[in-house]
């Protein structure tokens, strides 16, 4: 009889330990989910469509204005990142910006530095005297060490749109936005408006979608590694 009681007590204690373990695992999982959601909710990205207003940026070989392409692609990037559950702040949503370029740039930098985002993402188009030069390219500044990491990943994703693109990321300490923003900042030059083929593609909705998708996939991939996997590509 005594032995039966002892066995019963042992089984009772084992069951209690198992139930406690289940409860602990469930509690840990819930806490982990809450922490992930909280950290993901803290991710903010500023998307900066370059130029605007009286400043057209570069004028393409096909007369397309850089400022228009920048805004079109930036809006697509915004939509995709928001679908990934990331909060987005735009430096402009239309063609209205200060006429004075210096004032415009200062306002953009001020917005970024006051917002203190996880990343500032500047959208631009490139140009070069030689019409044969083409390919999307990402620029960064080593003022923030994370900038090189995100630039590398975004560049890799951009190559999936055009596998013939051999351009590499490039460090730059002269671009106003790169040297004055106090957070990780990259400039994505989506293509060369001086290259007839690329200039034509950049005006096409489908190609803009591909570029925007590549940029977003690069950013989310960087966040997944650099922010302990707290961002994901699933729609909310």
Image (spheres, grey):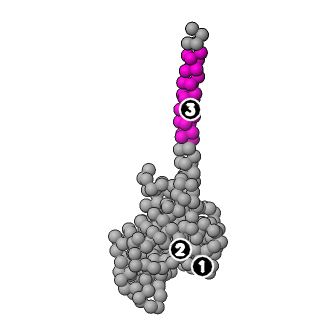
Tell me if label 1 and label 3 are in contact, CB under 8 Å. no
Q: Secondary structure at mark 3?
A: helix
Whether residue 110 appears in this view of the structure is no
Q: Nearer the viewer, residue 105 or 186?
A: 186
What residue is rendered at 59% in x and 15% in y? 6
Pair 2/3: label in front? 3
Position of 208 with respect to 225 (left or right) is left
Which residue in the protein does label 2 denote?
187
Q: Is residue 111 magenta?
A: no
Tell me if label 1 and label 2 are in contact, CB under 8 Å. yes
Which residue in the protein does label 3 denote?
21
Estimate the spatial distance between the alpha carbons at disc 2 and disc 3, rounded to whole Å: 49 Å
Residue 80's mark?
none
Estimate the spatial distance between the alpha carbons at disc 1 and disc 3, rounded to whole Å: 54 Å
Which one is earlier in the sequence, the residue at label 1 or at label 3?
A: 3
Which one is earlier in the sequence, the residue at label 1 or at label 2?
A: 1
Position of 227 with respect to 129 (left or right) is right
Magenta span = 6-31
Which residue in the protein does label 1 denote?
172
What residue is rendered at 60% in x and 10% in y? 2
What residue is rendered at 55% in x and 21% in y? 11
Image coordinates of residue 82 in percent, x first then y, are 46, 57
Q: Secondary structure at mark 2?
A: strand
């Amino acid at each position: 009889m005594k032995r039966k009681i002892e066995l019963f007590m042992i089984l009772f204690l084992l069951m209690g330990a198992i139930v406690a373990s289940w409860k602990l695992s469930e509690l840990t999982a819930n806490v982990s989910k809450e922490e992930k959601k909280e950290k993901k909710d803290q991710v903010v990205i500023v998307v900066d469509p370059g130029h605007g207003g009286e400043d057209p940026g570069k004028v393409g070989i096909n007369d397309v204005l850089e400022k228009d392409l920048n805004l079109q692609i930036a809006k697509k990037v915004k939509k995709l990142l928001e679908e990934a559950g990331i909060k987005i702040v735009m430096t402009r949503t239309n063609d209205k910006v200060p006429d004075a370029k210096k004032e415009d740039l200062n306002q953009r930098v001020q917005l970024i530095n006051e917002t203190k985002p996880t990343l500032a993402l500047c959208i631009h188009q490139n140009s070069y005297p030689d019409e044969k030069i083409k390919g999307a390219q990402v620029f960064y500044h080593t003022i923030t060490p994370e900038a090189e990491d995100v630039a590398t990943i975004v560049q890799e994703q951009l190559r999936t749109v055009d596998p013939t693109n051999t351009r590499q990321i490039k460090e730059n300490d002269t671009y106003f936005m790169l040297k004055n923003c106090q957070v990780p900042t990259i400039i994505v030059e989506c293509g060369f408006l001086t290259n007839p083929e690329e200039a034509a593609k950049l005006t096409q909705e489908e190609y803009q979608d591909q570029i925007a998708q590549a940029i977003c996939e690069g950013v989310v991939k960087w966040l997944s590694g650099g922010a302990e996997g707290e961002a994901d590509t699933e729609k909310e």
